[in-house]
Image (cartoon, rainbow, N blue to C red):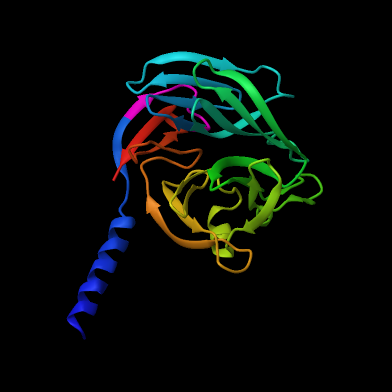
Amino acid sequence: MNRYLITGLALFLCGIAASAQSYVEKARFNAPDAKQAVAVDASHFYAITNTRITKYTMQGDSLMTWQEDDKEKVRHLNSGIVLGHRLYCANSNFPLYPMASSVEVFDTRTLRHIESIPFGIDTGSCTWVLPGKRCWYVFFAHYDKTDKTTGEVIDNSNLAQLVQYDRKWRRMHAWILPSRLLEEVRPASLSGAVLIGDTFYCTGHDAPKCHLLRIPDTGFTLEWIGDIDVPFYGQGIARGRDGDLWGIIRSESAVVRSTR
């Protein structure tokens, strides 16, 4: 074999190994609201539960809390991402049916609610929202559920999909999950994600790993290219500007910062 080809192959394999490197815990913070997700910016992190958000310093000091008592407005915040001074949170009416969703926006400086993007009864239960190139990506979960009395199927996790919207929140494209991944995460779905390059690092409900997904060149099914171990258990995650990956351990009300 040509030595240049051998060298190139070796570098390629090294690149794959590096990209598949697991994340390890770097720091852990007690955060009573770390039940659904964590979001981060350059100098703070935000612990998110169903109807509350608490802002912390990077040292874990609590600064302020937002809370909504009216469940007709906010019932189930799932995840969040900070863009500039705006915190975008996925919201749904889980566990109610039919499922309705919205994206709720907050000013990170004050945690004042400043905007709502309602989807209504549409594609499913919104669990995460991410910005793309001149677009938004929103994931709508479905869950295996039957009526306990009649046995009638109420919902099916196969219906979950990733929807791409333009900057004005007009639907453009959509993709479903691979059947093998559906079998792994059911009866739940994908709870959180970050976008690194062209790869979605997605968490399930309670497994300590991220599923790596990409948009396919053809067809309507996302490409599942592998998994990576992380030191937290599903739910909404975030990525810091330094590349650290943040998650929560809901059973311990803990926010975990991890690095490679």
Is residue 156 shown left or right of residue 66?
right
Residue positioned most to the left: 3
- Foreground of the two, 185 or 3: 3
Is residue 170 shown above or below 176? above
Q: Is residue 241 magenta?
A: no
Q: How many marks?
A: 0
Q: Quadrant of the N terminus?
A: bottom left
Is residue 138 shown left or right of residue 207?
right
Is residue 217 shown left or right of residue 197?
right
Residue 153 is situated, as x and y percent measured from the top left of the image, at: 76, 52
- Foreground of the two, 214 or 182: 214
- Foreground of the two, 54 or 6: 6
The span picked out in magenta is: 28-37
Q: Main secondary structure of the magenta part?
A: loop
Residue drawn at point x = 28 percent, y = 46 percent: 260
Residue drawn at point x = 49 percent, y = 57 percent: 213
Residue drawn at point x = 32 percent, y = 21 percent: 59
- Foreground of the two, 178 or 215: 215
Residue 229 is situated, as x and y percent measured from the top left of the image, at: 36, 50
Residue positioned most to the bottom: 1
Is residue 250 shown above or below 259? above
The image quadrant that residue 96 belongs to is top right
Residue positioned most to the right: 150
Residue 217 is situated, as x and y percent measured from the top left of the image, at: 55, 67
Residue 195 is situated, as x and y percent measured from the top left of the image, at: 47, 47
